[in-house]
Image: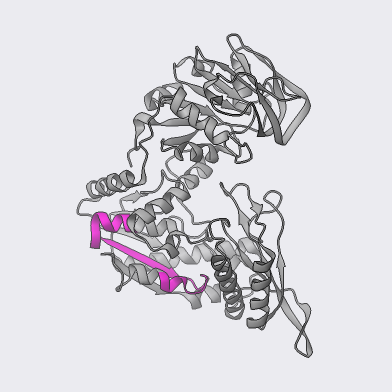
């Protein structure tokens, strides 16, 4: 796919910071296209990309330490505006002749920052005293030539600096996270006021342009798409259907590990009664997956079994279809970044389910969403008219409920978990919390029995764990503070209507230290 709005691109150079994707998202929220590349991107490649601006991310190291990740000093002499964030700010200071050293006092978390130069283009219209998010042990202790201080904290004398003549800007804090009260305004100011962007990155233009590009790319060829039931593969399939119609075959492998009704919902959209002109094949492979998983309790082994079996089923279906010219994948931008910092050979594995089949005969891979973040994919889905239950579906791991059962996966245990999961999702939707909650895994502790009192007797049922989390980047997440009345309704309904469950517990751990999934 050609880069959209390349004339207005902002380039993010990644130094290993945990918020690299979030920076790109914040830029795109201002309708300006943005890409993340590794810090090793050669200068000649940067010149060829011709970005309107460059943002340097945070990183885990000291800029002066042995083996520290760095960038060429000439980066700051390209005539392109540069914004350094955290490690990126320190690197700018270090390479431009300033001084960086271990701070007498580290700063982590919410910090009050004072703007000392309100004329700075980054801080126009921002209160002189505001709250930012800090995460640093080192700090800039000496200004490079041509720079002046624009913000400070009580223990960080250079919380922000700039050299407006060279269009170089730096902030020690993280404007990309929501904890920085006016961070989005600062980034918008950099993108619009410093870099001169006008904001032409829109989903409607992306859809029209992508459909036309797909028509040209595929021509009269045939394409094959593995539908998982998630939003990524669904949106990719609809884009292809709009472009090439019945030249597309969608294969939906029902591995029996989906949430309740999800398989039927996918078929309702893409099957015979749906609105899209595609060939749809649904394969009921539940029994073969259950047989392969019999007696298996180790989570990683489950993943590998499910992934391998998925590929085998898909291969068998593909052989019946015959040779195709293109294999369609719902790869999105975080898949690309996380797997190789922009390297093009990455294949999406659906969280270790799927991947690239060994024996499928195709000429080329088509990834129409590889430039988009998840929220942008959802926006495309809405633009294409996909139903809300598909567009807004909570992220779901490829191995499905197989890794949300702690213990052996059996048909009976899956039925228990599906029933409890459906109740939780229904109540969260009824309470209007779908936009607040990024996802809510429901976990069955299948190998645990807990004593309970139900009616006149004691029971020994399974505990169910609720794991509601809110997240912007999936790399970090906080547990969602659900209203007590909602929790009470979920618990009451589950323990009343799912006989095998007599206890519902709430996971109140953030990520880090805990992962989102329980496996």
Residue 451 position in % (x across, y down): 79, 79
Residue 206 position in % (x across, y down): 33, 44
Figure colour scheme? one colour
Going 71% across and 50% down the picture, which residue do you hit? 513
User: Is residue 240 covered in magenta?
Assistant: yes
Q: Say whether residue 315 is left or right of residue 258.
A: left
* Above or below: residue 437 compared with residue 148: below
Residue 200 position in % (x across, y down): 35, 36
Q: Which residue lies furthest to the left in this view?
A: 220
Residue 40 appears in the picture as rendered: no
Closer-to-camera residue (461/471): 471
- Figure disc tally: 0
Q: Residue furthest top?
A: 145
* Above or below: residue 52 compared with residue 479: above
Residue 369 position in % (x across, y down): 39, 48
User: Is residue 498 covered in magenta?
Assistant: no
Going 49% across and 17% down the picture, which residue do you hit? 167
Q: Give the range drawn in magenta.
A: 238-265
* Above or below: residue 217 compared with residue 93: below
Q: Say whether residue 291 is left or right of residue 134.
A: left
* Above or below: residue 177 compared with residue 101: below
Q: In which quarter of the image is the N terminus?
A: top left
Q: Say whether residue 125 is left or right of residue 299.
A: left
Closer-to-camera residue (56/322): 56
Closer-to-camera residue (112/247): 112
Quadrant of the rendered image containing residue 386: bottom left
Going 44% across and 35% down the picture, which residue do you hit? 34
Q: Quadrant of the C terminus?
A: bottom right
């Amino acid at each position: 796919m050609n880069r959209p709005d390349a004339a207005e691109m902002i380039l993010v150079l990644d130094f290993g910071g945990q918020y690299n994707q979030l920076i790109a998202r914040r830029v795109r929220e201002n309708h300006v296209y943005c890409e993340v590349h590794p810090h090793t991107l050669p200068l000649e490649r940067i010149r060829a990309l011709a970005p309107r601006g460059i943002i340097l991310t945070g990183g885990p190291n000291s800029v002066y330490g042995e083996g520290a990740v760095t960038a060429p000093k000439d980066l700051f002499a390209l005539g392109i505006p540069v914004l350094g964030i955290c490690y990126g700010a320190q690197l700018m200071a270090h390479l431009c002749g300033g001084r960086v050293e271990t701070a007498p006092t580290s700063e982590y978390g919410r910090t009050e920052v004072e703007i000392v130069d309100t004329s700075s283009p980054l801080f126009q219209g921002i209160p002189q005293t505001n709250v930012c998010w800090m995460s640093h042990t080192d700090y800039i202790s000496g200004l490079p030539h041509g720079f002046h201080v624009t913000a400070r904290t009580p223990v960080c004398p250079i919380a922000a600096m700039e050299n407006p003549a060279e269009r170089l800007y730096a902030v020690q804090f993280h404007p990309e996270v929501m904890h920085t009260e006016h961070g989005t305004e600062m980034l918008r100011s950099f993108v619009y006021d410093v870099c001169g962007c006008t904001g032409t990155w829109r989903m409607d233009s992306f859809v029209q342009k992508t459909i036309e590009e797909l028509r040209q790319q595929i021509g009269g060829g045939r394409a094959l798409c593995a539908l998982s039931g998630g939003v990524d593969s669904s949106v990719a399939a609809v884009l292809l259907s709009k472009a090439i119609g019945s030249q597309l075959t969608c294969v939906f492998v029902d591995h029996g590990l989906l949430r309740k009704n999800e398989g039927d919902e996918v078929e309702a959209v893409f099957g015979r009664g749906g609105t899209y002109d595609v060939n749809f094949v649904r394969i009921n492979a539940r029994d073969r997956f259950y047989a392969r998983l019999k007696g298996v309790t180790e989570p990683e082994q489950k993943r590998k079994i499910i992934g391998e079996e998925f590929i085998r089923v898909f291969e068998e279906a593909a052989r019946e279809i015959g040779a195709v010219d293109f294999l369609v994948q719902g790869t999105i931008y975080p898949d690309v970044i996380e797997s190789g910092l922009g390297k093009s050979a990455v294949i999406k594995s659906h969280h270790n389910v799927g991947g690239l089949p060994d024996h499928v005969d195709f000429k080329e891979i088509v990834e129409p969403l590889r430039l988009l973040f998840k929220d942008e994919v959802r926006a495309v889905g809405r633009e294409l008219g996909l139903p809300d239950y598909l567009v807004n579906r909570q992220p779901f791991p490829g191995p499905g409920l197989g890794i949300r059962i702690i213990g052996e996966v059996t048909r009976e245990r899956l039925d228990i978990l599906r029933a409890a999961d459906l109740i939780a999702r229904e109540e969260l939707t009824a309470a209007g919390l779908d936009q607040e909650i990024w996802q809510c895994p429901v976990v069955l502790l299948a190998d645990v029995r807990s004593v309970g009192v139900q009616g006149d007797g004691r029971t020994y049922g399974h505990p169910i764990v609720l794991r509601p989390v809110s997240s912007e980047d999936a790399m970090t997440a906080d547990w969602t503070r659900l209203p007590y009345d909602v929790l009470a309704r979920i618990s009451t309904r589950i323990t009343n209507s799912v006989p095998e469950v007599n206890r519902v517990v709430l996971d109140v751990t953030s990520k880090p230290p805990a992962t989102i999934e329980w496996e």
